[in-house]
Image (cartoon, rainbow, N blue to C red):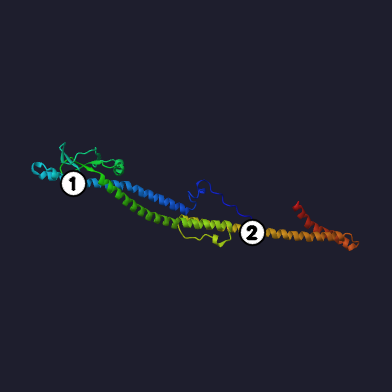
Amino acid sequence: MAEPPSPPEPSGPDRRGFFWPGGLSARLLILTSLFVLFGGALIVPPTLAAFEEQWLLDRVRAAELASLATEVAPDVVVSEQLSSELLEVAGVEWVAIQSDGVRRLVLRGNNMSRTPYLVDLRDQAVASWLAAPFQTMFGGEGRMVRVVAEPRFRDAEFIEIVAPDAELRQELTAYLWRLIAVTAFVSAMAGGLVYLSLNLFLVRPMQRITRGMELFRTDPDDPRATVKLSGRRDEIGRAEVELALMQGDLRAALNARARLAALGEAVAKINHDLRNMLTSAQIASERLAASADPDVGRALPRLERAPGRAVEPDRKSVR
């Protein structure tokens, strides 16, 4: 029996196993890990942006409450010491209020050596909102942030504060590392569950079907090549049913071919033996033709015609 041809060698990226593994299970693990990490990375910018926004709002509310102390001060004027204490408690340097179109400096701290960058919490674009935490963390040290927001405890158009962003940068960095750790843990758990689920319901059944096809190609009569039906109603179950039917049809065709081959071999052997016997009979009749016995002479034509008719068609078929 001729050796079955080997499957063609893979070409392209599949040949480089160190870069892109050929196994479906390994590919599934790599893709699942990449997609889950990518999904986790998408969560980081909006989470950091929300953290920074809440931190700035907390500073605004604290400064707004501190500015209310000026309303009860004599002549609506606070001393420098009280002003410093209020600013220190609120964690800001300047507090201003705009009401009826007039901007009024309520609490004033030290003079600023650098112009602060502006963050308007009333109306922020999505791109600037997402980029703000990274600008805070990597924008350099010694910067001041000017925050404008809507007041909650005052009847005013807006409240404005100026605060150093050093503390915000430190808290953002610490929060980022905590967020990375939590995201990595959740991603690992989710990725592992997704990988195990897909491997159980898709990869392993496909490996079993592929193994059955390989065994069937090597030896169709191998009982291990028969695909065991799982009873599933999805595409995997349909593939199992179709493969089992195909294997049955191929086995029937191979068995029929084997029977026909055996029958043809038996017929050829019988034909060969019959030709030998008839040839021997024809040779014997030719020897009898030399006999002078009149009875033999009368029977000899019929004896010669019988082997001749049997041998001659076979000779014609051979020619």
Q: Residue at x 57, y 61 (%)?
A: 222
Q: In the visual, does 26 lie left or right of 140? A: right
Q: Return the x and y of residue 104 as percentages of the image width and height.
A: 15, 38
Task: Determine the residue positioned at 36% across, 50% down.
Answer: 40
Specify the label residue 198 is tagged with: none
Q: What is the crowding at mark 1: few (fewer than 14 residues within 10 Å), some, or many (at least 20)? A: some
Q: Please name the residue that numbered disc 1 is placed on.
A: 88
In the picture provided, is 295 more to the left or to the right than 147? right
Q: Earlier along the polypeptide chain: callout 1 or callout 2?
A: 1
Q: 24 or 270, which is in the foreground?
A: 24
Question: Where 294 sits versus 128, above or below?
Answer: below
Left or right: where 269 falls relative to 193? right
Residues under numbered marks 1 and 2 in contact, where contact means CB atoms less than 8 Å apart = no
Q: Going by the picture, which residue comes out furthest to the right?
A: 292
Q: Residues within 10 Å of mark 2 (few under 14, many from 20)?
A: few
User: Which quadrant holds the N terminus?
Assistant: bottom right
Q: Amino acid at mark 2?
A: Ala
The quadrant in which residue 287 appears is bottom right
Q: Secondary structure at mark 1?
A: helix
- Residue 59, given in percent of the width and then of the height, sits at 21, 46
* As drawn, 165 above or below 283: above
Residue at image mark 2: 258
Q: Nearer the viewer, residue 61 or 115?
A: 115
**Nearest-to-viewer mark from 1 and 2:** 1
* Residue 37 shows in the view: yes
Q: Taking 200 as reference, is 15 above or below it? A: above
Helix, strand or loop for disc 2 = helix
Q: How many marks?
A: 2
Distance of label 1 from label 2 (alpha carbons)? 98 Å
Q: Residue furthest top?
A: 101
Q: Nearer the viewer, residue 111 or 314?
A: 111
Give the residue type that dot 1 points to. Answer: Glu
